[in-house]
Image (cartoon, rainbow, N blue to C red):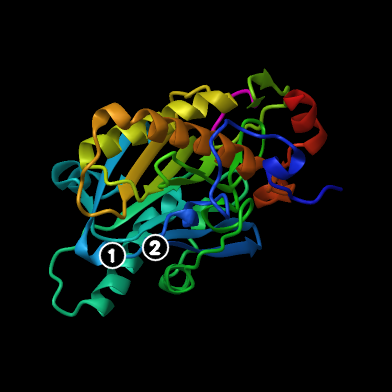
Amino acid sequence: MQSPRRVRDLGVVVGTLPTGPLNAITDVPGVRVGQTTITGDGLNTGVTAIVPDGWAQTLPAAVAVGNGYGKLIGTTQVDELGVIETPILLTGTLSTFRVADALITWLLDRDPKATSLNPIVGETNDGHLSDIRRRPITPQHVHAALDTASDLLEEGCVGAGTGTCALGFKAGIGTASRTTPSGQTVGVLVQANFSGLLTVLGRPVPAQPIDADGNSCMIVVATDLPLDARQLGRLARRAIFAMARVGSDYAPGSGDYAIAFTTARTPDFPDRDLRAPFQAVTESVEEALLNSLTMAHTTTGHQGRTAHAVPHDLIVQRAL
């Protein structure tokens, strides 16, 4: 038996930029994460909430779509206006709409004058390990994730990653961050649930493929760099590109999305200086995806199906 460990704790170092103090999306000042996990009786699912300070006054944002076979509620308004006006929530596919409705209730309770809200809710299909048709998410699960958001977050089989699988192994939630030479931070959180051949620092790790229902990945990118919506779109696209570094095959039945936002309200960043932010998001996504695997544990779920955790010694061997 092995205990979940972050890939960096296994001696595998991705890239060259320094990490933030927690090596997490919450290294970006004002960004917090809360999660609700549901397990047992054929269920392995949950909710993950990314809650940035200042969301009620809108924050610059952009969405990028790799494969569009998925659900990401609220994208058209983000594309049109270049901002988010709510926290960002992740869950299982058939619970997406219940989560969005519960988020609306939470928002209305905080703004008695609101008449229009644009909830941002994404998903991946956790039906391999969870009885997805039961749609077990309640408003209480959603509100608990939002109300308990903090700087510290768990990885692996928690929240929206409780029942997900990736690259032939049990996966889940992963996170990482990088500090740019200018002193700002890029942090990411991933909900990993996609196919391909696991690759560690450029070397493939053979695995017995899991015949899972649905293959997708949700990536949330946060930063305090003063980027505008167009530049955030460029950052989001690099996040999807980074999936290839761990072996994604971008299968046709996959929904691969990235949403990027900044906590800086006044855009003032020259395009010529985007090289470091691009590197930061690429390295962060690669490491977060690896963390989503090495922090997961073997899980048996719906109809007795089992997804095995990646053996850590395989990761270390391929990194040498």
In which quarter of the view is residue 139 placed? bottom left
**Screen quadrant of the C terminus:** top right
Q: Is residue 259 left or right of residue 162?
A: left
Does the magenta portion include 197?
Answer: yes
Residue at horizontal 53%, vertical 51%? 24
Q: Is residue 248 visible?
A: no
Residue corresponding to mark 1: 54
Earlier in the chain: of badge 1 and badge 2, it is: 2
150 in the magenta segment: no
**What is the span of residues highlighted in magenta in the rendered image?**
194-198
Q: Main secondary structure of the magenta part?
A: loop
SS at mark 1 in the image? loop
Residue 128 seen in this snapshot? yes
Q: Quadrant of residue 10?
A: top right
- Under mark 2, the amino acid is Gly
| In this picture, residue 308 sits left or right of residue 154 | right
- Badge number at residue 30: 2
- Assess whether mark 2 and mark 1 are in contact (beta carbons under 8 angstroms): yes
Q: Position of residue 156 (x, y in %)?
A: 63, 50
Image coordinates of residue 44 in percent, x first then y, are 61, 56
What element does badge 2 sit on? loop
